[in-house]
Image (cartoon, rainbow, N blue to C red):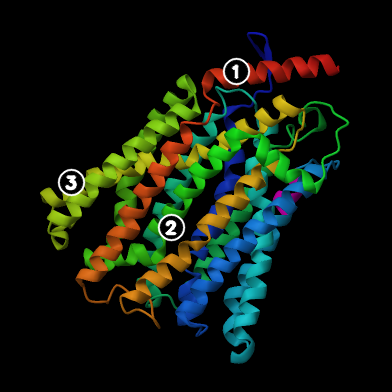
């Protein structure tokens, strides 16, 4: 413990915070892998495009529904090995088993039962995913409550996610797809092994980081108040910061999921630019520069508060989105090449790097902001319910972003892709260009504008969080 003015903060070392963030990276590995499940379902298992995208939407909604239930279970748990650690391990184990079943057996099931089997196994995957991701949001409250320390989560998360998504895209586009001749059974088998092994290792390291933190003395203010499942609605109704953060982050998530969809990436790099492998190489170029920008942004957040950093990064993202649209409309996209550097290539790299850094700060800082909303709830009502708070957020977030797969599937169907998704071999056309612009730029800008409006009514800036932590500290002292 460390004194800062009057507050006795529960501090964490930089190593503890960094290792804990690996829990989020562990689940993001599975999320990244599952971005390509539609190619397995349609190309290997033989399911129809519209059916698969509809299932993806339904599973996302199911994912949101399971969140409040699992959050409630976590808040009720007080085991000898902690409140959060058991569910991190359980969740990762379920993820590994369900992914193996989904990709190794669905195509072997008789055609008449294949769709039902796919849905059932996918549902089990969702439950495991929810167990582990709920702990990422909730366990931050036991890791540290220091306003100067919490933004470090965003720093590590930004770095790890940048390395994961850019390195993963490079591996897929430059190694695995050429090696296996596309999204074939061999591709999914090899990629799955990497995901299971690395994710399991990251989960173990994250559990170790919480070993001395996930203890009863860090589980909020002592209280005899019994929380029931029906308390979810009063909590949402009475917590304005949580409401605004949900609106802000969920609109961003919907747009960001469409932007990062594997179909969008293939349409941009494979069809418009004519070089799908460039998507992986660009990621490697962007990684170090994005990390530098993330360092700068987190330094800003630690000084002025997480809200301020979120708002500024969002405005920068909007501006760069407009500039990217102007670039795509006016530039010769087929001239963009790393083997022959020209002005178009330089502008493309600069704009993508700057926007990547701004997006990284904005999207990753949301998770520690959830912990701020949880502390606000404790300050206001005395309730320590980080599981419920995090999963309330996830429920609405996933419910809204659930429609990303359907948006992509339905929209590409309107331009002629009803039975097969676009691939890198699909010829360039005007409708494909404008659909890609809508997916890659238009929807993100709409999401960011909605975020900026919501943040006008979000009160938890840096100064307010210091006041709240002081009040919680005083409540604990009074209880003792």
Judging by the rendered image, the residue that carries numbered circle 1 is 466
Judging by the rendered image, the residue that carries numbered circle 3 is 347
| Residue at 67 percent of width and 15 percent of height | 470
The residue at the far right in this view is 224
Give the alpha-carbon distance from disc 3 to disc 2, as whole Å: 24 Å
Can residue 461 be seen here? yes
The disc at residue 168 is 2
Q: Nearer the viewer, residue 90 or 140?
A: 140
Crowding at mark 1 (Cα within 10 Å: few <14, some 14-19, many 20+)? some
User: Relative to 156, is 76 on the left or the right?
Assistant: right
Element type where label 1 sits in the image: helix
- Specify the quadrant that holds the C terminus: top right
> Which callout, 1 or 2, points to the residue nearer the camera?
1
Contact, CB < 8 Å: mark 1 with mark 2?
no
* Spot occupied by residue 465 in the image (x, y as percentages of width and height): 59, 22
Can residue 110 be seen here? no
| Residue at 30 percent of width and 56 percent of height | 281
**Which residues are the magenta region?**
84-89
Residue 95 vs 320, above or below: the answer is below
User: Relative to 52, is 441 on the left or the right?
Assistant: left
* Spot occupied by residue 467 in the image (x, y as percentages of width and height): 62, 16
Q: Earlier in the sequence, mark 3 or mark 2?
A: 2
């Amino acid at each position: 413990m460390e004194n800062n003015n009057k507050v006795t903060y529960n501090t964490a070392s930089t190593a503890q915070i960094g290792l804990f963030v690996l829990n989020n990276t562990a689940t993001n590995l599975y999320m990244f892998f599952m971005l390509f499940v539609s190619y397995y379902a349609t190309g290997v298992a033989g399911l129809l495009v519209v059916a698969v995208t509809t299932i993806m939407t339904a599973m996302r909604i199911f994912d949101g529904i399971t969140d409040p239930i699992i959050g409630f279970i976590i808040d009720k748990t007080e085991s000898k090995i902690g409140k959060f650690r058991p569910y991190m391990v359980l969740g990762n184990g379920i993820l590994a088993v369900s992914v193996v079943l989904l990709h190794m057996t669905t195509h072997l099931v008789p055609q008449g039962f294949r769709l039902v089997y796919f849905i059932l196994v996918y549902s089990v995957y969702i439950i495991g995913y929810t167990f582990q991701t709920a702990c990422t949001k909730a366990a931050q409250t036991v890791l540290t409550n220091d306003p100067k320390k919490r933004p470090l989560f965003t720093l590590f998360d930004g770095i790890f996610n940048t390395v994961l998504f850019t390195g993963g895209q490079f591996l897929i586009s430059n190694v695995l797809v050429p090696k296996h001749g596309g999204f074939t059974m061999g591709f999914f088998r090899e990629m799955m092994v990497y995901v299971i092994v690395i994710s399991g290792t990251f989960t173990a390291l994250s559990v170790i980081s919480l070993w001395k933190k996930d203890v009863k003395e860090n589980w909020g203010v002592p209280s005899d108040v019994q929380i029931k499942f029906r308390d979810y609605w009063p909590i949402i109704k009475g917590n304005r910061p949580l409401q605004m953060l949900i609106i802000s982050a969920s609109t961003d998530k919907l747009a960001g999921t469409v932007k990062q969809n594997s179909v969008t990436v293939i349409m941009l790099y494979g069809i418009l630019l004519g070089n799908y492998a460039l998507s992986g190489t660009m990621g490697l170029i962007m990684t170090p520069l994005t990390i530098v920008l993330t360092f700068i942004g987190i330094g800003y957040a630690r000084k002025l508060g997480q809200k301020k950093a979120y708002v500024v990064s969002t405005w920068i993202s909007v501006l760069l989105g407009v500039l990217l649209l102007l670039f795509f409309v006016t530039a010769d996209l087929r001239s963009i090449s790393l083997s022959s550097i020209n002005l178009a290539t330089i502008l493309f790299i600069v704009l993508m790097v700057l926007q990547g850094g701004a997006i990284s700060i904005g999207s990753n800082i949301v998770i520690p902001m959830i912990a701020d909303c949880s502390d606000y709830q404790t300050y206001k009502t005395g309730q320590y319910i980080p599981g419920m708070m995090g999963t309330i957020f996830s429920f609405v977030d996933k419910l809204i972003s659930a429609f990303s797969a359907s948006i992509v599937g339905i929209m590409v169907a309107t331009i002629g892709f009803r039975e097969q998704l676009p691939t890198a071999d699909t010829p360039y056309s005007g409708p494909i260009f404008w659909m890609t612009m809508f997916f890659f730029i238009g929807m993100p800008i709409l999401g960011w504008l909605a975020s900026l409006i919501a943040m006008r009514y979000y009160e938890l800036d840096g100064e307010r969080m210091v006041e709240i932590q002081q009040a919680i500290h005083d409540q604990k002292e009074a209880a003792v």
